[in-house]
Image (cartoon, rainbow, N blue to C red):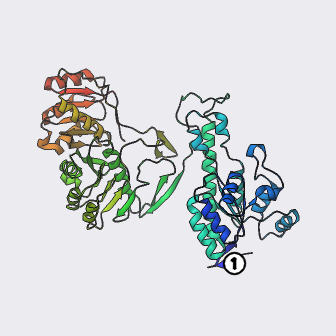
Amino acid sequence: MTQEQGGDATTPVRRALISVYDKDGIVEFAQGLADAGIEILSTGGTGRLLRDSGIAIRRIAEVTGFPEMLDGRVKTLHPLIHAGILAVRGNGKHIEDIENFGAPLIDLVVVNLYPFEQTARMEDIGLQEIVEMIDIGGPTMVRAAAKNFDSVGVVVDPRDYGAVLAEILEHGGLDRQRRLLLACKAFRHTASYDSAIYSYLSQLEPDGTRRAADSPFPQKLALEFQKVQELRYGENPHQRAAFYGEMQGNQPTLASAVKLQGRELSFNNLLDLDAALGAVLSIDGCGAVVVKHLNPCGAATGANSAEAFRRAREGDPVSAFGGIVAFNRVVEEEAAHELAAMFLEAVIAPDYSAAARQVLARKKKLRLMQLGGAGETGRPGFDLRRISGGLLVQDWDVDDPLDELTVPTKRRPTAEELRDLRFGWRMCRHVKSNAIVFTRDEMLVGVGAGQMSRVDSVRLAAQKAGERAQGAVMASDAFFPFRDGIDEAAAAGITAVIQPGGSIRDEEVIAAADEHGLAMVLTGRRHFRH
């Protein structure tokens, strides 16, 4: 039986089956169902919790006539339960079978699964304990209810309790659109669950021990992302676009950031915000970064957020116009006044003081993003890039510890030069290759990005820096194939260089540095960013 609500069939909910591992919010949800006169079937720990909370339930064993078996492995795997879930309400033969066998029709299934993935990540836990977290009855009920969404609702996420209960209380049941959305979410849930089990088991030897990590990359890569929002367009107006967030991971990210004000975020805004965020989180101390077209055009440290931004903006004030700014500390009122004094597309920071919010609120179009945390704690998963017909997968390129530097030149860098070399090296990682950056006093003063030859990147950085190159240091994301890059740097006023080394002409390059009296530091690691 159905009643029509706005032209969409609403299926009444008279009986619900509840069996959850995550019991957050379940008592309140079940109480709401019970108050609406809905019969509740339940199992094990969930049933005990509901009864102890004063909610009347009927145990699954009372329906099936069978107790739980095999230490709880078999509870809901019974024809009377699954017939009640899978019966098509409009199918006369189905309803006849239900009546003949005495199976109760189940209109709502509320199930979430054993925490397999969390258990598998735990230290010092045995294989058998992990295997016991492979839920069988739960996924079976979820899939059955999701398959029969035409007649049954299924809830796998506690965050849906409020909306589902509200609709049931208002209309007596769930409409088709709600049931379909819930079914889609349920199948996504079981797919992710099975994928996690596959990923774990595929790493085991026959004796159950973990296979030596000869490769961190699984044979089959399962990805799960949830749509955060649709975007007005992609890189260009003729391209459609959307933003998807990762389902796992709890680090501060753009997907979890909150937009406090301003225009809708665009595809290019998000790319630049990500670039700015990655760069600023690699800065030790209070820092600010200005990004334009995925490249830092300004970066600096400061005693506070205002000073850091002023110094970052001065790195290239022309390019900073219309840029994206990122901070790794709370934005205070003084910094807000500096930001409000120029045109910017977006700002992202861990947080903003109340006074800073008031100042920036006057810039109604400025996109203001609150990250809600600080500190680069590492990105989960892999770095993924689409190419024609496939996907390239690699580790994330993370900062060097810079604790094993070598100095091949006659002159060693001074303490101030070494400080700026370290700063430049960290910024260089965020600039498109071939990447050259000039830094002075922990401030970016010149950038050469994305040139086809390294010497041209040096010349571009020198042009950007102008007189500020005098006494600055240079960082290069990869080795110098010829000495010409060193010659150009020396002519611009550079006093020290940091680079990976490894060229067949390293001796020639080092000799050039010695000729000019430059100190040179080798890291042994490059940072291409294509």
Q: Which of 482 and 328 is in front in this view?
A: 328
Quadrant location, the C terminus: top left
Q: Where residue 414 sits in the image (x, y, percent)?
A: 17, 28
Extreme residue in the right direction = 100
Q: Nearer the viewer, residue 169 or 228?
A: 169
Number of numbered discs on residues: 1
Q: Is residue 427 left or right of residue 27?
A: left
Q: Where residue 404 sits in the image (x, y, percent)?
A: 32, 25
Residue 266 visible to the viewer = no
Q: Nearer the viewer, residue 185 or 517?
A: 185
Question: What residue is shown at x 43% (from left), y 43% (from top)?
Answer: 379
Question: What residue is shown at x 46% (from left), y 59% (from top)?
Answer: 242
Query: Residue beneath label 1, please?
Result: 3
The amino acid pointed to by label 1 is: Gln
Which quadrant of the structure image shows residue 507? top left
Quadrant location, the N terminus: bottom right
The correct choice, above or below, for 288 with respect to 211 in the image is: below
Q: Where residue 509 sits in the image (x, y, percent)?
A: 23, 25
Residue 258 visible to the viewer = yes
User: Regarding mark 1 in the picture, which secondary structure is present there?
Assistant: strand
Q: Where residue 214 sits in the image (x, y, percent)?
A: 54, 28
The correct choice, above or below, for 196 with respect to 77 in the image is: above
Q: In this view, does 169 lie to the left or right of 84?
A: left
Question: What residue is shown at x 82% (from left), y 62% (from top)?
Answer: 103
Callout 1: 10 Å neighbours few (<14), some, many (20+)? some
Which quadrant of the structure image shows residue 437? top left
Q: In this view, does 416 lie to the left or right of 53?
A: left
